């Protein structure tokens, strides 16, 4: 009898635990949930803790409330100038309205798939109206904002809040790399030729000015030297004239000695003169008679 009562008590306890388990559900700090009754929404629960529901009639679907990362697959986009490029991007998002997510895509996996489609579509759309050069320049931040704004608006209708959209990498496909690089090299060479031409023009201008300044300086130096030489010659002539006037005989003797020294200093000078020439008058006697 006692065993029967114990068995009945255990059965009642087990049934009570099952009933209690079916009538409660726990929401964690990182979760939010919606309660459905025969498939119809009854309430949205965002507070963490133990909550009650009607067993076997109501069921609960949980959704993450944290910021999640959607790492999109690398895709090939075509720019406005019909250039192909590979884009690798990711998005940060969170489920803001779990009821809308449930009504639109049922669960988190469906939300992620739909958001991926939205992001890829807007990536292609924004890159499709841009030239390749713009996508590789400093304007890429503007492109990112345009993509994020478009994805945010479209995802809001699903109950998803887009926190950020980032472009990790943009690469040119191998078949496009060579022509693009050749075009960039041609552009840089054109710039180099223009800079070099300006440099040569400036060098020619500087050289011409230097030559003109040199000619002017040399002309002025020649003029000044000729003036100084003339003044020196005038002083020398005056000095010679004064010396001649003071002692004409000594001056004649000095000039003759200078002529002897200059004409015979090499030791190989040959002269044919008459013995009674005035040139040898100081060789005849010390008096020069």
Image (cartoon, rainbow, N blue to C red):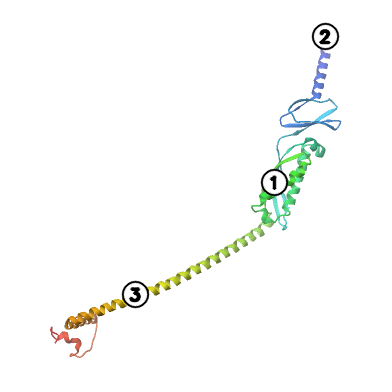
- Of residues 208 and 285, the one nearer the viewer is 208
The local secondary structure at tag 3 comes to helix
- Of residues 185 and 24, the one nearer the viewer is 24
Which residue lies at the image location 80% right of the left edge and 39% below the top edge? 105
Q: Nearer the viewer, mark 1 or mark 3?
A: 3
Which residue lies at the image location 80% right of the left edge and 21% below the top edge? 20
Mark 3 or mark 2, which has the lower sequence index? Answer: 2
Q: Is 92 situated above or below 42?
A: below
The residue at which mark 1 appears reads as 89
- Crowd band around label 3 with a 10 angstrom C-alpha radius: few (<14), some (14–19), many (20+): few
The residue at which mark 3 appears reads as 225
Tell me how far mark 3 sits from mark 2, CA to CA: 145 Å
Q: Is 17 situated above or below 46?
A: above
x and y percent of residue 27 in the render? 75, 28
x and y percent of residue 231 in the render? 30, 77
Q: Is 36 left or right of 256, judged from the image as shown?
A: right
Q: Is 169 left or right of 52, judged from the image as shown?
A: left
Q: Which of marks 3 and 2 is in front?
A: 3
Tags 1 and 3 touching, CB below 8 Å: no
The residue at which mark 2 appears reads as 2
Q: Is 116 situated above or below 184?
A: above
- Of residues 175 and 153, the one nearer the viewer is 153
Which residue lies at the image location 82% right of the left edge and 29% below the top edge? 59
- Crowd band around label 1 with a 10 angstrom C-alpha radius: few (<14), some (14–19), many (20+): many
- Of residues 242 and 6, the one nearer the viewer is 242
Q: Is residue 73 visible?
A: no
Mark 2 or mark 1, which has the lower sequence index? Answer: 2
**Quadrant assignment for the N terminus:** top right
Tell me how far mark 1 sits from mark 3, CA to CA: 81 Å
The local secondary structure at tag 2 comes to helix
x and y percent of residue 93 in the render? 72, 40
């Amino acid at each position: 009898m006692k065993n029967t009562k114990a068995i009945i008590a255990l059965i009642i306890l087990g049934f009570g635990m099952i009933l209690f388990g079916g009538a409660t559900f726990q929401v964690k700090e990182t979760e939010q949930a919606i309660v459905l009754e025969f498939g119809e929404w009854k309430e949205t629960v965002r507070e963490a803790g133990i909550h009650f529901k009607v067993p076997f009639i109501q069921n609960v679907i949980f959704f993450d409330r944290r910021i999640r990362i959607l790492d999109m697959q690398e895709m090939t986009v075509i720019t406005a100038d019909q250039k192909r490029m590979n884009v690798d991007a990711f998005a940060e998002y969170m489920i803001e309205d779990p009821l809308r997510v449930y009504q639109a895509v049922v669960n988190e996996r469906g939300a992620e798939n739909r958001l991926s489609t939205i992001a890829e579509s807007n990536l292609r759309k924004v890159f499709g109206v841009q030239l390749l050069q713009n996508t590789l320049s400093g304007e890429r931040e503007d492109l990112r904002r345009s993509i994020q704004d478009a994805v945010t608006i479209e995802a809001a209708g699903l109950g998803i809040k887009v926190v950020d959209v980032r472009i990790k990498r943009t690469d040119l496909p191998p078949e496009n790399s060579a022509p693009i690089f050749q075009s960039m090299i041609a552009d840089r060479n054109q710039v180099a030729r223009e800079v070099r031409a300006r440099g040569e023009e400036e060098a020619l201008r500087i050289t011409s000015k230097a030559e003109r300044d040199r000619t002017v300086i040399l002309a002025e130096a020649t003029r000044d030297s000729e003036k100084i030489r003339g003044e020196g010659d005038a002083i020398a002539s005056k000095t010679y004239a004064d010396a001649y006037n003071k002692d004409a005989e000594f001056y004649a003797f000095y000039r003759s000695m200078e002529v002897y020294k200059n004409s015979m200093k090499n030791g190989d000078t040959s002269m044919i003169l008459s013995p009674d020439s005035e040139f040898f008058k100081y060789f005849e006697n010390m008096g020069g008679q």
